[in-house]
Image (cartoon, rainbow, N blue to C red):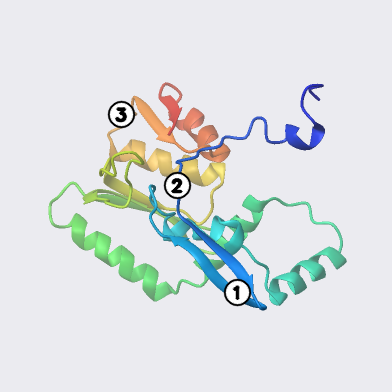
Amino acid sequence: HSPSIPPHEQRDVYRTVKRTGCEACIKFKIENGVWIVDKFKNVHNHPFIDDKQKHLIRSYRHMTNTNKSILTSMAGAGEYWLTLRDCQNFLQSNRMNLISAGDCQTLINHFNCLQSNGSNFSYTFQLDEEQRLTNFFYFGDVVFDTTYRTNKYNMICNVFFGCAFLSDETIASFVWAFQSFLKAMGNKAPKTIFTDQDHAMANAIKTVFPNTNHRLC
């Protein structure tokens, strides 16, 4: 602990704080037990948080009685040695189990149709021990994805040439996806790969693309 900073304030020393000087506010006063709006200013000098991220705001986070009951039951059953990623992988695998054989066959039929048109379209898929579709990868269908934008200029910044759908986020699944990509590219590895801080993906990149520069976006 730093001797010049009180212990209760030290936790905020290294916290990144961004202030914009926004003057938007609302103030109340109480007259005879009645709350009255005394001041209201609705002019902001910053963009609002995206709808997809609102659940991260403290005021939006809450636990329902059902959530509490489930956690209580798990705690009462004993210790569970698992991580958040383990839970996410289980839920993803569970969703894959709900995909019917007809859906999988329709997808493969569609890919066969695209491939038969004489284009450079290619695809591959992976089955589990029970012959159920788990992962699939396709390449050659150019898609402009307008949902990925830069923070500062709000400009479209990337183009998809291929796509992989994985049932989990394990090293083995990422290795399979990268190997499928490498095969579609004629065994020509990319010079640089930008990813988030996913350890499984980073390990898979070292395995499949040992000479590729891996950077965090």
Indicate left or right for 195 with 141 as reference.
right
Indicate left or right for 172 with 6 as reference.
left
Query: Where residue 18 sits: x, y (%)?
Result: 51, 38
SS class of the residue under badge 2?
Answer: loop
Mark 2 crowd level (few <14, some 14–19, many ≥20, 10 Å Cα): few
Q: On the rendered image, what quadrant is the C terminus found in?
A: top left
Indicate left or right for 212 with 170 as reference.
left
Frontmost residue, 98 versus 54: 54
Frontmost residue, 5 versus 148: 5
N-terminal-most mark, 1 or 3: 1
Give the spatial CA distance, label 2 vs label 1.
25 Å
Query: Where residue 124 sits: x, y (%)?
Result: 35, 51
Query: Of discs 2 and 1, which sits in the foreground?
Result: 1
Q: Which mark is drawn over residue 35?
A: 1
Quarter location, residue 24: bottom left
Which residue type does callout 1 highlight? Trp
Which residue type does callout 3 highlight? Lys
